[in-house]
């Protein structure tokens, strides 16, 4: 029940052709009062907003942009169901004034559905510029609905449009359903079917009979399905429809679907003739631009340039240019976001005692939060840049120019954006890459693109490549990087081709696409759309990524080893050191500070004490300062008595570190991940890997760069007390080169495996969200890993047999 | 003389005579985009590799692959210089 005095709410569904400026108009009407979601069960974006006008509260729902209301694409089905089943109080059709004839085709279909309708004649300014003079009154009479001229991106026509919507919603405008005449032959057929439908009470009340009759003649699968589920005697109606349809097709040489379209377009052409005067028809700017960008010679270079600039701009805006004011300095947006979980949150967990809780917080939850938040700036700017290319109209030209090339691999022109963002240019990221597939409206092409884009060399694979190349291919650094980039493209395109012949079989989606006129994008709309989409990414992907990263943490953390043997070694070493120090002036300091604190100071002294730290130490425990600094090797002993104690302390600290590293390695080896790695060894060994590689690769599922730190752990390397060690990669490279069994061949196989195997958690989750099915996400992880293994194993076996790189 | 849209060169004007049987969803799509009997079109250009092509139809620009264009029967009206 509405509260007394509250305004009545009416729903307005906004329909329209793609490129008619529907989104701009929706933004104009609703301002910032919007929510974005998905239509239930499908990945089509659904936007809603409210605005109060006059005595009414208008709840405005944005439908997907469509050319028609056939059941040809998912967008069309969604738009149609939203009008037929949800029965909005008013339908607002956004019509491109400069492209009236084709836009009226949809308007007529909407008018035929019998819902109250208002036409917004958008981009009226462009129509005027092109010398088109449209008689609004006459158009309104011809269509039998109110028509309002608008220029949405300049905010013109908002008031008039809201007035018209309110008037129609209040029933102040007599609504006459548009009667498009389909000619005597079809009209007879329609009448016959309307009689049958009308006789069926349930069906006639669910759907407008004339509309349903026409849909049945058009052999619309969805309409037939509705008859089957709703009608009392569906077969009578469907049989009649089939009989009439084939009869007409035989007689007219054209099936009813074609005749219906012909008559509708004929009707639209008639209206345009009556309502539009053409003053002149010169070359438009769009024609001039297209002459250049679709040119035989310049087409490819220009696409390459635009895609490259889009890529650069995305990554520079997100993570290249430091332009965010930050504690008196400047940082990048990614820097600001990562600060939260690299600096701020660890400060809260720092005081916690080491243990399962701290480990869970640091390596499970914070890593998970980082896995979500760290991508936000990238995702936001990718959406921003992409929306700019999309709104400008250039995306359609990319598809046009590259179609012939990518079609050969079962992809299409627009796939290139997702591939480039994913790392087609080194240093990309598959998460925004997966989200970039939204420009592809065709499900199969989109799915294929999502499944192959992660093969591209994203930024997180780069450190792994860098380390392995430094260790084994140092002389061919440039060549190797080039080879890996070329291989990633080959695998992605090859995999696309295979997928299209196996799991994503089906006719290639027809390429029948409008090349819309160019527009200068409106920054406000771009920012809004990028903001909304990024927010949705965080909301939808956030919890899943967090959950999986906790799971991955548990894999490497559990079960725990018995700490006693390690602690005993530490105790023994501490006691030996204490005994050695006995009698020296430092024994008291040792007792007072305790071995753990002392070791801590030595470690800090090694990295150079900060001035306040040094002052604090000098003040509170003056005798510790020379001891730790000498032990750390940053100060020459001034007095002899300090040298020996410092050596004892240093040896103690080294033991502590060694035990910690050993414990870490044994812990990892004993963990679920380690056991899994051991269990996988028979398989892994075919590709030249041992359990260490497997564990590192498992760790890399959280994020590819983790392969390095995990691998370092399995070799008891790295600084167990700090999250990062700048020298770690170098030390790891040295260690691997010195380790028997590590050959260039094995390194190359690992490079291939890292390039191809399952995408990181954030990417897999993005695939799940964007494909609308977790099955595809799981498929992506499994088939990539299988491919990676087959490739690595083949290369290793062939290489070993031929003695290459061993 | 009838031929299909796929056979036309850049700068050709033509009138649509109909669509060839088969095609299914493609044909439906073409109808919705205004590829109906009697409509006139102009082949504006081809993509750098000669396919797809861009036609001017009902005042807007339509990109279409030659595979799909082969469904569309046309009658040549002459060339535009």
Image: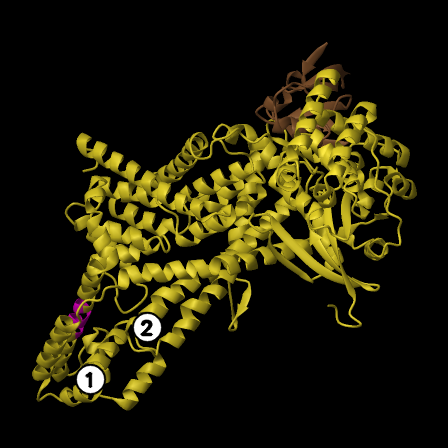
Residue at the disc numbered 2: A357
Q: Is residue A520 visible?
A: no
A741 or A15: nearer the viewer: A15
- Horizontal side, residue A437 vs residue A188: left or right: left
Q: Chain of mark 1?
A: A
Q: Answer above or below: position of A126 versus A30.
A: above
Asked if the magenta segment contains residue A658, the reply would be yes
Question: Where residue A594 is drawn, which disc sits there?
Answer: 1
Which percent across, then down, holds residue B34?
73, 29
Q: Which residues are magenta?
A: A653-659
Question: Where residue A566 is drawn, which disc sits there?
Answer: none
Provide the major secondary structure of the magenta segment: helix
Which percent across, then down, holds residue A805?
21, 37
Quarter of the image that includes the C terminus of chain A: top left
Any idea which chain is the yellow one in this picture? A
Any idea which chain is the brown one in this picture? B
Q: Chain of mark 2?
A: A
Q: CA distance from mark 2 to mark 1?
A: 25 Å
- Residue drawn at the location 25% of the way across and 62% of the way down: A718
User: For the residue labelled by badge 1, is the local secondary structure a helix, a strand or a loop?
Assistant: loop
């Amino acid at each position: 029940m509405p509260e007394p005095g509250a305004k009545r709410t009416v729903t307005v569904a906004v329909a329209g052709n793609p490129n008619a400026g529907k989104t701009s108009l929706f933004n104009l009407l609703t301002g910032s009062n919007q929510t974005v979601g998905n239509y239930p069960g499908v990945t089509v974006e659904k936007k809603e907003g409210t605005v109060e006008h006059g005595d009414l509260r208008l709840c405005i729902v944005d439908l997907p942009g469509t050319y028609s209301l056939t059941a040809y694409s998912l967008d069309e089905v969604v738009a149609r169901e939203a009008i037929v089943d949800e029965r909005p109080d008013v339908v607002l059709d956004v019509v491109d004034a400069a492209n009236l004839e084709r836009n009226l085709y949809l308007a007529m279909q909407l008018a035929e559905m019998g819902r109250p309708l208002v036409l917004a004649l958008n981009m009226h300014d462009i129509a005027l510029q092109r010398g088109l003079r449209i008689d609004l009154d006459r158009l309104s009479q011809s269509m039998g609905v109110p028509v309002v001229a608008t220029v949405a991106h300049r905010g013109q026509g908002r008031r008039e449009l809201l007035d018209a919507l309110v008037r129609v919603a209040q029933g102040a405008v007599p609504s006459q359903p548009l009667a498009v005449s389909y000619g005597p032959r079809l009209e007879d057929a329609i009448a016959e079917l309307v009689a049958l439908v009308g006789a069926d009470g349930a069906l006639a009340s669910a759907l407008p009979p004339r509309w349903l009759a026409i849909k049945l003649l058009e052999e619309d699968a969805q309409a037939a399905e509705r008859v089957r589920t709703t009608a009392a005697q569906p077969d009578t109606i469907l049989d009649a429809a089939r009989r009439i349809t084939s009869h007409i097709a035989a007689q007219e040489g054209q099936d009813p679907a074609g005749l219906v379209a012909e008559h509708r377009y004929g009707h639209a052409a008639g209206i345009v003739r009556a309502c539009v005067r053409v003053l002149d028809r010169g070359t438009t700017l769009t024609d001039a631009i297209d002459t250049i960008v679709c040119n035989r010679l310049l087409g490819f270079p220009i696409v390459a340039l635009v895609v490259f600039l889009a890529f650069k701009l995305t990554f520079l805006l997100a993570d290249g240019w430091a332009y965010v004011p930050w504690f008196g300095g400047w940082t990048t947006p990614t820097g600001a976001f990562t600060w939260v979980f690299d600096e701020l949150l660890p400060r809260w967990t720092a005081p916690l005692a080491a243990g399962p809780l701290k480990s869970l917080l640091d390596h499970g939850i914070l890593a998970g939060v980082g896995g979500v938040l760290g991508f936000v700036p990238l995702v936001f700017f990718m959406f921003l840049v992409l929306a700019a290319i999309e709104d400008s109209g250039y995306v359609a030209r990319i598809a046009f120019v590259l179609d012939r090339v990518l079609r050969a691999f079962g992809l299409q022109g627009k796939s290139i954006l997702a591939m480039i963002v994913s790392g087609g240019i080194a240093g990309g990221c598959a998460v925004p890459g997966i989200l970039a597939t939204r420009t592809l409206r065709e499900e199969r092409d989109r799915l294929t693109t999502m499944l192959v884009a992660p093969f591209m060399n994203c930024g997180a694979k780069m450190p792994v490549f860098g380390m392995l190349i430094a260790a084994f291919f140092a002389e061919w650094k440039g060549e190797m990087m080039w080879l890996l980039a070329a291989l990633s493209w080959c695998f992605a395109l090859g995999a696309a081709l295979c997928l299209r012949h196996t799991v994503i079989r089906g006719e290639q989606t027809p390429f029948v696409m409008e090349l819309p006129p160019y527009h200068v994008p409106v920054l406000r709309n771009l920012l809004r759309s990028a903001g909304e989409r990024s927010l949705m990414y965080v909301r939808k992907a956030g919890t899943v990524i967090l959950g999986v990263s906790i799971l991955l943490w548990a894999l490497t953390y559990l079960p725990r080893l018995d700490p006693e043997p390690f602690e005993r070694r530490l105790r023994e070493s501490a006691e030996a050191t204490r005994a050695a120090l006995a009698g020296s002036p430092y024994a008291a300091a040792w007792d007072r500070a305790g071995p753990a604190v002392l070791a801590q100071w030595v470690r800090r002294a090694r990295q150079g004490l900060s001035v306040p730290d040094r002052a604090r130490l000098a003040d509170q425990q003056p005798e510790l300062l020379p001891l730790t600094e000498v032990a750390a090797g940053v100060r020459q002993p001034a007095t002899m008595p300090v040298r020996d104690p410092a050596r004892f302390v240093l040896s103690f600290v080294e033991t502590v570190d060694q035990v910690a590293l050993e414990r870490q390695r044994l812990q990892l080896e004993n963990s679920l991940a380690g056991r899994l790695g051991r269990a996988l060894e028979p398989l892994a060994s075919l590709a030249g890997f041992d359990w260490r590689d497997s564990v590192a690769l498992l760790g890399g599922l959280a994020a590819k760069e983790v392969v390095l730190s995990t691998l370092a752990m399995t070799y008891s390397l790295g600084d167990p007390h700090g999250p990062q060690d700048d020298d770690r990669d170098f030390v790891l490279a040295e260690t691997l080169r010195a380790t028997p069994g590590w050959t260039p061949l094995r390194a190359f196989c690992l490079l291939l495996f890292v390039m191809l195997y399952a995408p990181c958690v954030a990417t897999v989750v993005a695939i799940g969200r964007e494909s609308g099915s977790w099955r595809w996400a799981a498929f992506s992880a499994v088939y990539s890993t299988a491919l990676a293994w087959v490739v690595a194993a083949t290369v290793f076996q062939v290489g070993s047999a031929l003695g290459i790189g061993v | 003389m009838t031929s299909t849209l796929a056979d036309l060169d850049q700068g050709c004007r033509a009138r649509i005579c109909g669509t060839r049987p088969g095609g299914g969803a493609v044909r439906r799509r073409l109808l919705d985009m205004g590829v109906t009997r009697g409509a006139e079109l102009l082949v504006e250009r081809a993509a750098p590799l000669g396919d797809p092509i861009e036609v001017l139809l009902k005042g807007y620009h339509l990109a279409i692959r030659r595979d799909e264009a082969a469904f569309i029967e046309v009658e040549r009206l002459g060339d535009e210089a």
